[in-house]
Amino acid sequence: STHGDTSVPATYLENPQLGNWVDNQRQLYRMRQEAEENGITTTYEFITAERIDRLNSIGFVWNANDAAWNLRFEELKQYIEEHGNSCVPGIYLENEPLGLWVAKQRRTYKVKHRVKLEAKKKNREEGKDLAAETSLSGERIDKLNAVGFIWDVHEAQWLERYAELKKYRRDHGDTLVPKHYPVYPFLGRWVDKQRFDFKRFMAKKKLEECDEIEDREEIEELERLASLSTGMTEERVRLLDAEDFIWDPFNHAWEQKYNEFCMFVRMNGHTAIRSRRKGYDPLARWAEIQRKNYRKKIDGEKTTLTQERIDKLERIGFLWDNRGMETRPPAKAARAAAGKELKSTI
């Protein structure tokens, strides 16, 4: 009547004898249950049915751990009802024990899952027993699943951003989300992170799969990227590719301009674009940037103009020196080359 429950601690300073007695009743009850499961009929030697009934009549808690777990579970259900999810912060000032309990369920679940996987790999039967020994039983997992418990918060957050990306693409036609996008405030930074993670993921993959990289600088850069942590996985790459995710926005912008340039060549039969031509100023400036980058490359300076880009431009007869008008290819050949390049990008 004083505390409202029968969860007397085993070490109850106000009445040590009571704490010991309550703990003893629980032990006797467990012994009776085990005896019954093993077909022993003289279970009254442990605790009689009459005493069990009397204790049940005052709401006696036979398993203190179960009672504590169920109490937190009810608090979790209340949290979900109020917040719409089970992502209770680790430091939840309104109910600190709940935040700690939720974190513990996730840790225990990971341990249980890892033990099962290890046992499966080693084909060991004892792994099942080890997994079963965790405090998170199958029944508790089912109860948590029934209320939509999120076992992996990071994965849930990733999928939430991914759903936002799909909506953005549906509305804008691409995945070029600006860093500051008020509709989905966290999406821009998330998109950037996917690109960084992808670079690191691909660097690790390339180092594992390629044994014939001769460029020492390339190897060092790959090793640097591969040493950094990444959240990218094959499954995430697959999901993002399904949404035509643009992994490199700078390369995407170059390819767009290149396609525009091919259209110009196809229409005009040459690559000698001039900025004075009406409507072509941005494209003419882009062409001039390619020439400047080409000169830098010739001089041994660092530039974004890769050999692959040089090859693409030369396939359509690009003039590295725009003064050499007389060297431009015949109009028919230029148009055909540009048309072929455009078809290859479709």
Image (spheres, grey):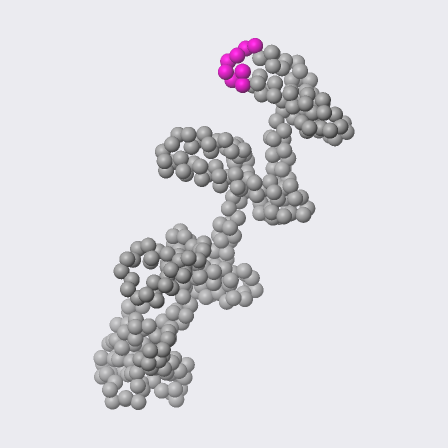
Using residue 69 as the reference point, say whether residue 176 is left or right of it.
left
Vertical order, 293 against 126 (above or below): below
Residue 242 shows in this picture = no
Could you tell me which residue is drawn at 24 percent across and 87 percent down?
327
Judging depth in this view, the residue of 27 and 195 nearest the camera is 27
Residue found at x 52% / y 12%: 40
Spot occupied by residue 107 in the image (x, y as percentages of width and height)? 53, 41
Marks counted in the figure total 0
- 259 or 36: nearer the eye? 36
In this orientation, which residue lies closer to the viewer: 167 or 216? 216
- Tell me residue 335's x, y (percent): 26, 78
From the top left corner, tell me how far across and down residue 175 is, in percent: 45, 63
Q: Quadrant of the N terminus?
A: top right
**The residue stretch that appears in magenta:** 34-42
Q: Is residue 170 magenta?
A: no
Residue placed furthest toward the top: 42
In the image, 225: left or right of 56? Answer: left
Question: Which residue is at a point 37% across and 61% down the rendered structure image?
Answer: 222
In-image side of 146 versus 209 (left or right): right
Residue 206 drawn at (x, y percent):
33, 58
Q: Is residue 121 left or right of residue 108?
A: left
- Residue 70 appears in which quarter of the rendering? top right
Q: Is 306 in front, or is 122?
A: 122
Asked if the stretch drawn in magenta spans residue 40, the answer is yes
Q: Is residue 135 visible from the viewing direction of this image?
A: yes
Q: Residue at x 36, y 78 (%)?
A: 301
- Against 128, residue 299 (above or below) is below
Q: Quadrant of residue 328?
A: bottom left
Quarter of the image that includes the C terminus: bottom left
